[in-house]
Every structure is written in structure tokens, then in C-alpha cells.
Image (spheres, grey):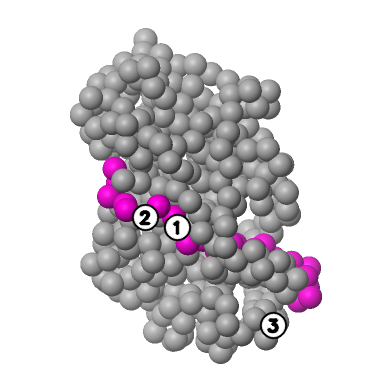
């Protein structure tokens, strides 16, 4: 049984070690909301992946924290559930806001796995002890800087390089990278910056042997992606526009893409992420685990999810030390030669660094059943 006795909400601001530019903006720091659920003398921890403003999808940190306090935590505090899916069903009548709901769901999975003394990945049905990872590289000032950045990460053994692109900065970095590294697994991510009017430019990417083009069109679109997929040879990979297993089914059924980037929190948590994985397997579509520049807490959740068998393409879950001088967890999460070892031990296998988090937290709240 899973009894939720108390909850803590924390908010940490971490400076990023690199400037991360995407088609929707520039990031130099990360606002990390954390949720700790307590029960039976154990703790489960999760990380929110919404951003301070609705730039990637519609959710925000402030909106998510409001929903936790006022709507979601009151539904679970002081209550007992058979398992994390039963707990999540208590939030099932609420619409959207999947990243906020996922904070509750994912912390519950961690707590549940610790209660059963089992690694989270194994509980979800995964078998791998290490997972293949790549990197997502932000937009650079020019071709030379792009190639240099790619070189550094290829040398570190990352199994796939993903370049962020936007209108006006797409064919140039891709051509330069492909010329310098003819053999690497290369992809691009547009974060919804194009429309069907750009079909010609996107079709030109077919010349560069990309494994996929990630989310070229609108964040809430599937239909135009299907039209585009009929006009380009490179498989499209859906990110933003898949918020559920139903979205995945509809997208794959109409041919909106051939690959899915699964982000646990974007789809509402581990159980839904596993359903997206299962739908993709039924369609024969490979999946991989995306990232949202997570701290160690979210990163560990991602690594565990990536142990499921359908995750056959390298994920974005690169070494934590790329992002942070000091992480919020005790354990290092470091890829070696493009392989990330799944943290051992029950749950996510990682522990909050209470000392560090206590020092840098901008917000600390305890919540109990009334
Ligand atoms: O589209 O995958 C994305 C980061 C923030 C928002 C959206 C995306 C990303 C990344 C970073 O690509 C992946 C990572 O290194 O965590
Ligand atoms: Mg993406």
C-alpha cells in the first residue's frame, strides 16, 4: 500500500554551465521545482519540467506549484492507494497540466519502488543496466562553433548529436556538421519553429542523412506533420505534440511521424510514458527518452524509463556534469562512452543532497493532510 503522509515542495534555481539557445529562446539557468512525498518512513522525489514561462508547452512553474498546493496534493495527502496508478487516478478527472500531475505521479512511483525495495526501471518493466545517450546542442553563433561543439561531444563518445535549428539557421549547421563528421548519428530539433510554407527548406534536410527531424511544426499539431511527412523522406520525430498515448496513437495512425520522443513529465508520468512506449511498439515506431535540462532528480527518472525495450534510439539524458557545477543529488550521473549506468538501489536510486538544496532553495513548504 502507498500512504501519502506528507509532502514537501522546494524550488531551486541552478545556473547552467552553457548558454542553451533554441528556436523559442535562450536559457542560462534552470528553475527546478521538486516534490518530496513521504510515507512509511520513506521518501519519493520528483522534478517538475515546466518552465518559468510557457515557451515549450503551455505549463509554467508558477501554475504547477499553484495546482500542487490547491488542487493535487489535497487529493492525495493523508490517503492510501493500492499503487501509483491508483494514486494517479485520483487526479484523472483534471484536464491537461500533465507536467504538474506528473510531479505527484513520479514521486509516487519513486516512493512505491522504494517501498517494494526495487529499482524503478525494473518495476516499470525495464531490464537494461545501462542506456545509450546522446546530446542536444543549442544554437551556436556560427558553423565553426557548431562543428567545434559537435567535435567535443563526439570525442566524449555520445551516441547521437542533436542540433537545435530555427528558420535561418538550419541547413548551414547541418551541412557543416555532416561534412566534418560523415558517419555520426545526427538529428535536428526545431521546437515548432516552422510551418508547411517551409516545406522546401525542410525537404532540403533530406540530403544529410538525419535519423529524424524533431517537432518541425506547431506544438499542438499532428495533422500538418502528417502532410509534411508525406513530402519529406527523413522521418519526423514528435515531441511537443504528443501529450498522451492517445496523441501517440493518432499521430502514428495518420503518419505524422515515425519516431517519438518520450518525456515522462510531458505525458503525465511513468504509467502514461509506458503506454506511449507500448503504442509506438505496436506501430513499429522507435522511441527515445527526451530531456528538459533536468537536475539529477528528473534525470534519474528518465534513465529508469529508458530501460524499457522500445527505447532503441539514444536519449537526451547526457552527463549531469555537462549542465551543473553542483547537482541537487548526491550521486554523479555520468555517461561513459555514450552509456549511462542506471543508478542502483531502490526507486530512482538517487538521494537529494539536502545540505545543498537547503542552502539554495528559494521556496520551502511542508504540506500535510488537514
Ligand atoms: O525540445 O527536447 C527539447 C530542452 C528544453 C526544452 C525542450 C527541449 C530541450 C532539449 C534539451 O532538447 C535536452 C536535454 O539536454 O535535457
Ligand atoms: Mg524536442
Disc 3 secondary structure class: helix
Q: Position of residue 331 (x, y in %)?
A: 56, 38
Q: Is the CB atom of the residue marked by disc 1 within 8 angstroms of ligand 1's nearest atom?
A: no
Q: Residue drawn at (44%, 37%), measured in percent from left and top?
A: 349
Please indicate whether residue 95 sits to the left or right of residue 25 in the image. left
Crowdedness of circle 2 by 10 Å Cα count: few (<14), some, many (20+)?
Answer: some
Disc 2 secondary structure class: loop
Is residue 354 one of those drawn in magenta?
no
Is residue 136 one of those drawn in magenta?
yes
Crowdedness of circle 1 by 10 Å Cα count: few (<14), some, many (20+)?
Answer: many
Disc 1 secondary structure class: strand
Circle nearer the N terminus (3, 1): 1
Circle nearer the N terminus (3, 2): 2
Seen as rendered, the residue at the extreme left is 82
Disc ID at residue 180: 3
Q: Position of residue 185 (x, y in %)?
A: 54, 76
Q: Nearer the viewer, residue 305 or 220?
A: 305
Please indicate whether residue 216 sits to the left or right of residue 83 in the image. right
Crowdedness of circle 3 by 10 Å Cα count: few (<14), some, many (20+)?
Answer: some
Q: Which residue is mark 2?
A: 128
Q: Which residues are magenta?
A: 123-146
* Quadrant of res 154: bottom right
Q: CA distance from mark 2 to mark 1?
A: 7 Å
Q: Is residue 12 above or below residue 218?
A: above
Q: Residue drawn at (73%, 49%), measured in percent from left and top?
A: 17
Choose mark 3 or mark 2, whichever is in front.
2
Q: CA distance from mark 3 to mark 2?
A: 33 Å
Q: Are marks 3 and 1 in contact (CB under 8 Å)?
A: no
Q: Residue drawn at (55%, 50%), measured in percent from left and top?
A: 292
* Quadrant of res 73: top left
Q: Are marks 3 and 2 in contact (CB under 8 Å)?
A: no
Amino acid at each position: 500500500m502507498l500512504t501519502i503522509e506528507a509532502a514537501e515542495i522546494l524550488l531551486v534555481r541552478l545556473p547552467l554551465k552553457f548558454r542553451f539557445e533554441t528556436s523559442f529562446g535562450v536559457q542560462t539557468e534552470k528553475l527546478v521545482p521538486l516534490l518530496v512525498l513521504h510515507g512509511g518512513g520513506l521518501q519519493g522525489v520528483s522534478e517538475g519540467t515546466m518552465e518559468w514561462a510557457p515557451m515549450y508547452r503551455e505549463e509554467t512553474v508558477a501554475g504547477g506549484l499553484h495546482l500542487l498546493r490547491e488542487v493535487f496534493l489535497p487529493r492525495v495527502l493523508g490517503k492510501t492507494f493500492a499503487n501509483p496508478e491508483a494514486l494517479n487516478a485520483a487526479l484523472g478527472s483534471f484536464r491537461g497540466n500533465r507536467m504538474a500531475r506528473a510531479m505527484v505521479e513520479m514521486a509516487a512511483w519513486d516512493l512505491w519502488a522504494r517501498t517494494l525495495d526495487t529499482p524503478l526501471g525494473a518495476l516499470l518493466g525495464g531490464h537494461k543496466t545501462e542506456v545509450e545517450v546522446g546530446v542536444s546542442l543549442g544554437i551556436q553563433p556560427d558553423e565553426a562553433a557548431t562543428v567545434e561543439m559537435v567535435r567535443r561531444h563526439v570525442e566524449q563518445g555520445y551516441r547521437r548529436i542533436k542540433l537545435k535549428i530555427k528558420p535561418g539557421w538550419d541547413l548551414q549547421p547541418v551541412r557543416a556538421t555532416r561534412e566534418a563528421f560523415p558517419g555520426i548519428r545526427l538529428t535536428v530539433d526545431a521546437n515548432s519553429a516552422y510551418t508547411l510554407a517551409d516545406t522546401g527548406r525542410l525537404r532540403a534536410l533530406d540530403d544529410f542523412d538525419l535519423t529524424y527531424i524533431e517537432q518541425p511544426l506547431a506544438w499542438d499539431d499532428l495533422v500538418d506533420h502528417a502532410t509534411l511527412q508525406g513530402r519529406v523522406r527523413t522521418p519526423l520525430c514528435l515531441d511537443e505534440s504528443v501529450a498522451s498515448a492517445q496523441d501517440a496513437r493518432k499521430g502514428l495512425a495518420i503518419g505524422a511521424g515515425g519516431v517519438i520522443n518520450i518525456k515522462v513529465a510531458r505525458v503525465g508520468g511513468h504509467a502514461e510514458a509506458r503506454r506511449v512506449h507500448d503504442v509506438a511498439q505496436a506501430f513499429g515506431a522507435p522511441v527515445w527518452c527526451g530531456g528538459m535540462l533536468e537536475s539529477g532528480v528528473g534525470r534519474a527518472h528518465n534513465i529508469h524509463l529508458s530501460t524499457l525495450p522500445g527505447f532503441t534510439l539514444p536519449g537526451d539524458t547526457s552527463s549531469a556534469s555537462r549542465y551543473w557545477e553542483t547537482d541537487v543529488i548526491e550521486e554523479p550521473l555520468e555517461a561513459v562512452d555514450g552509456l549511462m549506468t542506471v543508478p542502483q538501489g531502490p526507486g530512482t536510486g538517487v538521494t537529494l543532497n539536502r545540505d545543498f538544496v537547503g542552502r539554495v532553495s528559494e521556496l520551502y513548504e511542508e504540506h500535510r493532510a488537514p
